[in-house]
Image (cartoon, rainbow, N blue to C red):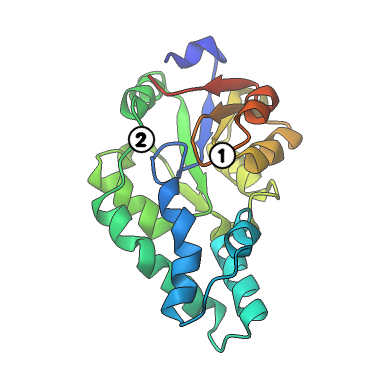
Amino acid sequence: MNYKTLIPDLQGAIFDFDGTLFDSMYLWDNVANDSLCVLGIAPPSDYRSALRNLSVPQAAEYTIKRFELSLSTKEFVALINSLVEHYYFDEIMPKEGVSEFLQNLLDNNVKTCIATATDKHLVEAALKRCGLKHFFSEIFTCSMVGVPKDNPKIFETALAFLKCPKEKTLVFEDSLYALKTAKRAGFKTVGICDNAEKNQQELKSTADFYFQSFK
């Protein structure tokens, strides 16, 4: 896929990580319930859906309050990260065509960074293992900016870092709610197909551009 079919004079690109660059959303389908099981709590049927649009710290706060846990937010976040860590260090892989697409951006001096709800050390580990870290000038996380992706702060922070005009910057997202946030904030958006997002038709109709893959 040649980015010039989207915005010929593109200057900046902000990428989500899980489900957009890497095929890793399957991990998060089970980690919420697994974290409760580790604590000896039977997961209620609505628990996973309740966490769907929350950042990891928000999910921790919600869980601690709902189940009256004695853990701190920091301790629960550490528990969640411990359940997924080895996948980022050892297993998950980029989606097909990602490396070639990123190389195309690099060759044309398009600035790139990541905006993700996943902790930075996990994203860095996967990027380094797969030889992709050099493509990105920075990784911004919801924990760093203090809000989830229903707030545009993470995208605005990334844009300020890139120092690119908003109209010449693309936001790549597989999640409908996060893409809507970026679009409401005035960004041009690219919807990325991923099976974890069940509302593909709405993602496609909402995004300015839509990729089935990066090939």
Count neighbours of disc 1 (C-alpha within 10 A) and say few if under 14, some if 14 to 19, many if 20 or more. some
Q: Please say whether residue 58 is visible from this viewpoint.
A: yes
* Residue at 41% from the left image edge and 66% from the top image edge: 81
> Closer to the observer: label 1 or label 2?
1
Residue, disc 1? 197
Q: What amino acid does circle 1 point to?
A: Glu
Q: What amino acid does circle 2 point to?
A: Phe
**Residue 110 sits above or below residue 174 on the image:** above
* Residue at 61% from the left image edge and 41% from the top image edge: 160
Q: Is residue 65 left or right of residue 144?
A: right
Nearer the observer, 13 or 211:
211
Q: Secondary structure at mark 1?
A: loop
Residue, disc 2? 135
Location of residue 208 in the rendering, given as x and y in whole percent from the top left corner: 65, 21
Q: Is residue 142 left or right of residue 137?
A: right
Q: Is residue 109 left or right of residue 103?
A: right
Marks 1/2: CA distance? 26 Å
**Residue 131 sits above or below residue 143 on the image:** above
* Residue at 32% from the left image edge and 23% from the top image edge: 100
Which sits earlier in the primary sequence, circle 1 or circle 2? 2
Q: Secondary structure at mark 2?
A: helix
The furthest residue to the right = 184
Q: Please say whether residue 166 is visible from this viewpoint.
A: no
Q: Quadrant of the N terminus?
A: top left
Location of residue 175 in the rendering, given as x and y in whole percent from the top left corner: 58, 40
